[in-house]
Image (tube, grey):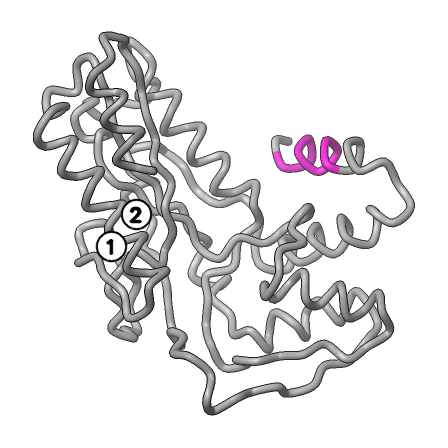
Amino acid sequence: GTVHLLEAIRQSDQRCACVVITTDKCYENKEWLHAYREEDPMGGHDPYSASKGCAELVVSAYRNSYFADCDRVRLASARAGNVIGGGDWAKDRIVPDVFRALQAGQAVPVRNKHATRPWQHVLEPLSGYLTLGANLLADRPFVSAPVQSLCSAFNFGPNLLSNKTVLELVQTILKHKEGHWIDCSDPRAVHEASRLNLAIDKAHHLLHWRPRWDFDKTIEMTVAWYVGSRSRDIVELTQNQIADYCS
């Protein structure tokens, strides 16, 4: 999909800005204590991670080969942390699993309780993507950074203190919503990274972007959405949370 998109852009004569969104899983995970920076190697132990690393390499190749002058096409990529928040009901994702279990009156199954992730509310990376895209598209970027430096990769992650284990995430949710959890660890399960952090210095210095909500606020707003969605208008609920974030 990434190749088809970029090839269509290359063959077009339209001026455009493009932000390709991948994931923090694009990095070759070495279980480091320190955070991954945009220049760290791409890769992955599992097919999902490898595919996201490949997408980043394709973006870099097209930018270097066809769009290096950042004139007609301004191309960047963005990598977020572990996104949570209202509206996610996907299978095998920890927060939807928590609320499906709670709503069914069941214990919350926790598969990988010691794994650490950079948890962030979905509105955080969205604000980063929009900030990056707006600056790429503008004749004169709103920030002082040269446009060539914006045609690159960016991490949009949470503050360091939002790097919590899966168990800490579940226990914090259960402070807001009554329930209990059970350990469903499986030693035969497929490989999953145990530690993953993102460095966000580049977004801060070049785009003046920073996360607004800390871990506790992120959990509070996430729980409020899932609980509120059972009795309130979802559009109104979501718009109120966006307004809260923008304020």
Residue 201 shows which numbered tag?
Answer: 2
Q: Which residues are magenta?
A: 238-245
Image: 246 above or below 17 = below
Residue 70 in picture, x, y percent from top left? 17, 20
In which quadrant of the rendered view does residue 220 lie? Answer: bottom right
Cβ atoms under marks 2 and 1 closer than 8 Å: yes
Magenta span: predominant SS is helix
- For the N terminus, give its image quadrant: top left
The residue carrying mark 1 is 37
Crowding near pointer 2: few (<14 within 10 Å), some, many (20+)? Answer: some
Q: CA distance from mark 2 to mark 1?
A: 9 Å
Q: What kind of residue is marked 2? A: Asp
Q: Residue furthest bottom?
A: 187
Tell which of 180 and 202 is nearer to you.
Answer: 180
Q: Quick one: quadrant of the C terminus?
A: top right
Tell me what residue is drawn at x 91 percent, y 46 percent.
231
Work out whether 242 lies above or below 227.
above
